[in-house]
Image (cartoon, rainbow, N blue to C red):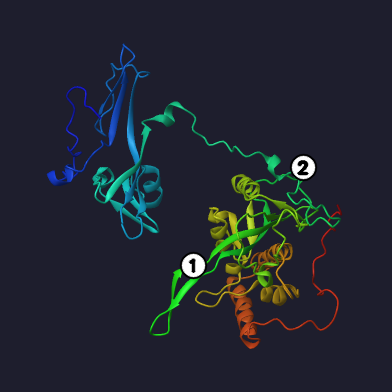
Amino acid sequence: LQSKGPRKELGSAEPGQPYPSMEELKNVWIPHAIRMRLTKNKELDVCNWSESDEPSVSDDPDSVHVYDLMATVVHILDSRTGGSLVGHIKVGETYHQRKEGVTHQQWYLFNDFLIEPVDKWEAVQFDMSWKVPAVLYYARRNLNAKYNLAIKNPIEASVLLAEASLARKQRKCHATFIPLMLSEMPQAGDLVGLDAEFVTLNEEEAELRSDGTKSTIKPSQMSVARITCVRGQGPNEGVPFIDDYISTQEQVVDYLTQYSGIKPGDLDAKISSKHLTTLKSTYLKLRFLIDVGVKFVGHGLQKDFRVINLMVPKDQVIDTVYLFHIPRKRMISLRFLAWYFLDLKIQAETHDSIEDARTALQLYRKYLALSQGGAEPDDVRKVLKGLYEKGRKMDWKVPEPDGPGSPKHAAVYPPVLAL
């Protein structure tokens, strides 16, 4: 940036801020703020600017704008690993006022899982021998005051309506889901039962150390293979409206059929008889549901969303693995909870997304009945204590079925229409 006219030196600090050393200033390449002015000759005049200064009142507001540095992304060089990207982000007053009750701005370093506050000069110091700039993000000052920056959801409800399957062989079989009608479109706070199944694309690479312990060199890579969403209320409660098998072009090394229910061929458009779709199509559906504000009910959803690679606000996730859990004790499987509380025998041979999502919804209803039916907190703790005592006695194993027939408390759901 070429400075136009007398301005504060780039290294000058704000009142109360320490001055960086001359050695540090050698590596300061960019200013924290810049001013852009369109001259009468329609030329663009760009110069350094102080973070604390505003344009002169005599300046034309339509031709003079100040931009503040909000984030930088740098490439940290490492000849052994190829390096990594880290970010410096300027976090505004709103966050700190909400979290700490104070009004100030602060720069933070984001390095993988590490987040820590840093001096503002660190965001603009670069050294080609080890710290190379990759992205510089400036935002126009006071933009919110002039424009409506409310985010509009670009995904329309039509993504939840019926769609064609990618599977070429349309065999005669019963549909596993009924798409939502326009009158059923979800609203904020509606319950949606969700379950996901995964396959393995790459096996874990590990080695044994000399002391006999295992060292993981490369973790296994999982890919989502099936996502099911069931209605959480209304006359069709428990009936699936999404049951997508995700087509993949990558080599699957393990279908994990015993745990996922996914079989070889289910994800192949040439031979699959399932409702096969693309990952993008399913992502759009889930993203729409998240943005609408539904509450997802399931078992182990925290892990599922992490593998699916979706960020869902905590207040939109109801995870039954935590509802029926005593701190510092083991997590309990969906199968054991279903048997203990609902007298249901599930996952007898393999997992099924529809069955698991329905069961999680029923367990949540059971939890509400226990906790909101006038019961005291001590009563709920007694129920959980009894659950853990029973589990220890049975070694957390569900007894084998005594005979044919559905469990006495099994819920009855409307049949799914045939194709």
> Where's residue 171, x and y in %?
84, 55
Q: Considering depth in this image, is 19 or 146 the residue closer to the camera?
A: 19
Question: Regarding mark 2 in the picture, which secondary structure is present there?
Answer: helix
Residue 104 relative to residue 98: left or right: left
Residue 313 relative to residue 240: left or right: left
* Residue 103: quarter of image: top left
Question: Regarding mark 1 in the picture, which secondary structure is present there?
Answer: loop
Q: Considering depth in this image, is 379 or 393 the residue closer to the camera?
A: 393
232 shown above or below 7: below
Q: Considering depth in this image, is 386 or 213 the residue closer to the camera?
A: 213
> Where's residue 417, x and y in %?
85, 54
- Compute the Cα span from label 2 to label 1: 45 Å
Callout 1 crowding tier (Cα within 10 Å): few <14, some 14–19, many ≥20: few
Disc 2 or disc 1, which is closer to the eye? 1
Residue at image position (31%, 57%) is: 79
**Where does the N terminus fall, quadrant-wise?**
top left
> Where's residue 107, x and y in %?
31, 47
Three-letter amino acid code at the position of disc 1? Pro
Three-letter amino acid code at the position of disc 2? Ser
- Is residue 105 in sight in this rendering? no
| Circle 2 residue | 183
| Circle 1 residue | 219
